[in-house]
Amino acid sequence: QVQLVEFGGGLVQTGGSLRLSCAASGRTFSTYPVGWFRQAPGKEREFVAAITWSGSNTYYAASVKGRFTISRDNAKNTVYLQMNSLNAEDTAVYYCAARGSASYPVSRESNDYNYWGQGTQVTVSS
């Protein structure tokens, strides 16, 4: 079993930065692909970014590419999401999620992820 906890959300002004962390329990976490998703009020959950187990490949939604960076430190069982140049459209609850097997590929689909954190609120004020 893997348990995920997100940290680092908060209130930031337009143009500011935040770094989210996703800390995991479970020795197998370091072998799983991980994704970040977000859900704004009244909207469906959407893909933000994903990373392979080794960190060698990363994937981004078009809306965040060039502004957000996903990375991981497997020695610390932690995945990060560095968010720069934030704007009001980035306001949402951000979730990290892990796929359930080392053999699963990275995915942009939330239904493909087995483990989820509780989410952390990011609010960007204009």
Image (cartoon, helix red, strand yellow):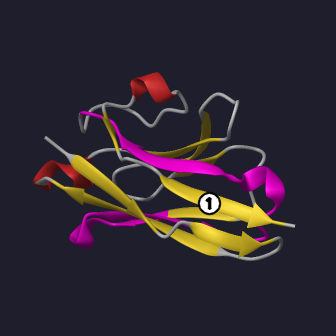
Q: Quadrant of the C terminus?
A: bottom right
- Looking at the rendering, the stretch of residues picked out in magenta corresponds to 71-100
Report crowding for label 1: few under 14, some 14 to 19, many 20 or more residues within 10 A (C-alpha). Answer: many
- Would you say residue 64 is visible in this rendering? no
Q: Quadrant of residue 2?
A: top left
Seen at 32% across and 57% down, the residue is 5
Q: Is residue 57 visible?
A: yes
Q: Amino acid at mark 1?
A: Val
Against 30, residue 11 (above or below) is below
The question of residue 26 being in magenta is answered with: no
Left or right of 62 on screen, residue 34? left
Residue 89: within the magenta? yes
To which quarter of the image does residue 9 belong?
bottom right
Picture coordinates of residue 107, whole percent (x, y): 49, 32
Residue 103 location, x and y as percent? 27, 33
Frontmost residue, 35 versus 53: 35
In the rendered structure, the answer to whether residue 86 lies left or right of residue 82 reads right
| Looking at the image, residue 21 lies above or below residue 90 | below
56 relative position to 86: left or right: left
Query: Quick one: SS at disc 1?
Result: strand
The residue pinned by badge 1 equals 122
Q: Can you give x and y, in whole percent of width and height, for residue 123 in the image?
A: 68, 61
The image quadrant where one finds the N terminus is top left
Q: Where on the picture, by quarter, is residue 6?
A: bottom left
Q: Residue at x 38, y 31 (%)?
A: 113
Residue at image position (24%, 55%) is 30
